[in-house]
Image: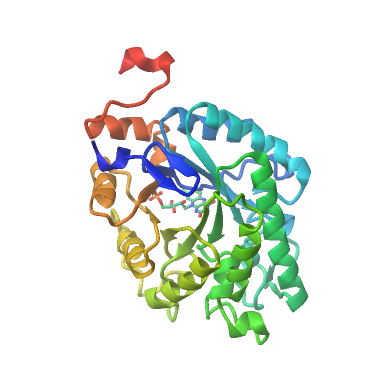
Amino acid sequence: MAHLFEPFQLKGLDLKNRIVMAPMCQYSVTAKDGKPNDWHFTHYTSRAVGGTGLILMEMTDVHPDGRITDYDLGLWSDDQIPAFARIIDAVHGYGSKIGIQIAHAGRKAEDAAQPVAPSPIRFEGSQYKTPREMTTDEVKRMVELFADAAKRAVAAGVDTVELHGAHGYLIHQFHSPSTNRRSDEYGQDLARFGVEVVQAVKSQLPSQMPLLMRVSAVEYVDGGYGLEHMIEICREYQRAGVDMFHVSSGGEGRPGARKPGNYPGYQVPFARAIKEALHIPVIAVGMLEDFHVAESVVGNCDADLVAIARGMLRDPYWAIHAAQALGVTPEVPKQYTRAF
Ligand SMILES: Cc1cc2nc3c(=O)[nH]c(=O)nc-3n(C[C@H](O)[C@H](O)[C@H](O)COP(=O)(O)O)c2cc1C
């Protein structure tokens, strides 16, 4: 049996294989109402038909001003729940598990009239505005917005929730010394906002539903934080209730000299380091599309799961094709068995 096709269990989440569809913004909400539509339905159910173990729906925002663009998904209102539930039910019908990545873009909210952030430091690039520093009360309210969105995700039927703590979005902005210059308690303790979000979100999940969190293990801007900083932040998040980390990197600004370049598996050592330091399951991501590279990540115990992003845009049946390449009889819908 290929390692990629061993089942995986984390609390009440049981997966048929180790393959995750990474969250990928589709920027396809035409009505600007945050609701997934037929595009999203087809996009996600195709990857379920394609044999993916766990599908993570794209960055879904807790407030309209937390969207990267007005075409992003949102869970800031109860009337958004049914459109998510339709997709989740269908994905379950095709044998995959599904979670939603919950987020706020903070200073990277391109279409917000006035983006908010921990500190008024603008993200590089002409499309970004200088954010307004959130008041302490607004930070506390933001924690509640994350919890409310998670509650709606649960009502829609998810198997797990992923918090977006990576790529320079709001949670990342709080735990990075380069974007958090606050003098209140949320600046004195860089993990505090994320910890409160984790605790508040966790309180909305059924006891057996694991909470995932995506983090950027290192920053690539000159003067950005390194792996040791992020391991200590992750330690706090783990104590607060994170059950598995999804380990990415960067996204906080223009990469400086620290960026090693992109090559297959370039983020895998970060996933392994967090797994070893905290004794916690991890998802590796980043140029793992080659079936044998993905297999080696699980086989070498670098990570528990592998997430595929662009590879699944190219091939919705990536998991079926991985099974064939690794000598495993693929699980396909009965309508397709004559082809396998
Ligand atoms: C079109 C697109 C949209 C993305 N949107 C998100 C997102 O919503 N949330 C997130 O955490 N990462 C997002 N990413 C990053 C991917 O999840 C992934 O980390 C990255 O593409 C590297 O994996 P890959 O080499 O398999 O593509 C996006 C990537 C792409 C290509």
Colour pattern of the rendering: rainbow
**Quadrant the N terminus occupies:** top left
Q: Residue at x 59, y 63 (%)?
A: 198
Residue 193 location (% of width, % of height): 62, 72
Q: Nearer the viewer, residue 173 or 13?
A: 13
Check the image and name the residue furthest to the top: 338
**Is residue 36 in sight in this rendering?**
no
Residue 154 location (% of width, % of height): 65, 45
Rendered view: 181 above or below 231:
below
**Is residue 131 in sight in this rendering?**
yes
Q: Nearer the viewer, residue 269 or 53?
A: 53
Which image quadrant for residue 197? Answer: bottom right
Q: Nearer the viewer, residue 196 or 117?
A: 196
Check the image and name the residue furthest to the front: 207
Rendered view: 48 above or below 63:
above
The mark tally for this picture is: 0
**Quadrant the C terminus occupies:** top left
Q: Is residue 147 left or right of residue 168?
A: right
Residue 18 location (% of width, % of height): 36, 43
Q: Is residue 142 left or right of residue 216?
A: right
Q: Residue at x 62, y 65 (%)?
A: 199
Q: Residue at x 75, y 67 (%)?
A: 141
Q: Residue at x 32, y 48 (%)?
A: 288
Residue 120 location (% of width, % of height): 66, 78
Which image quadrant for residue 159? Answer: top right
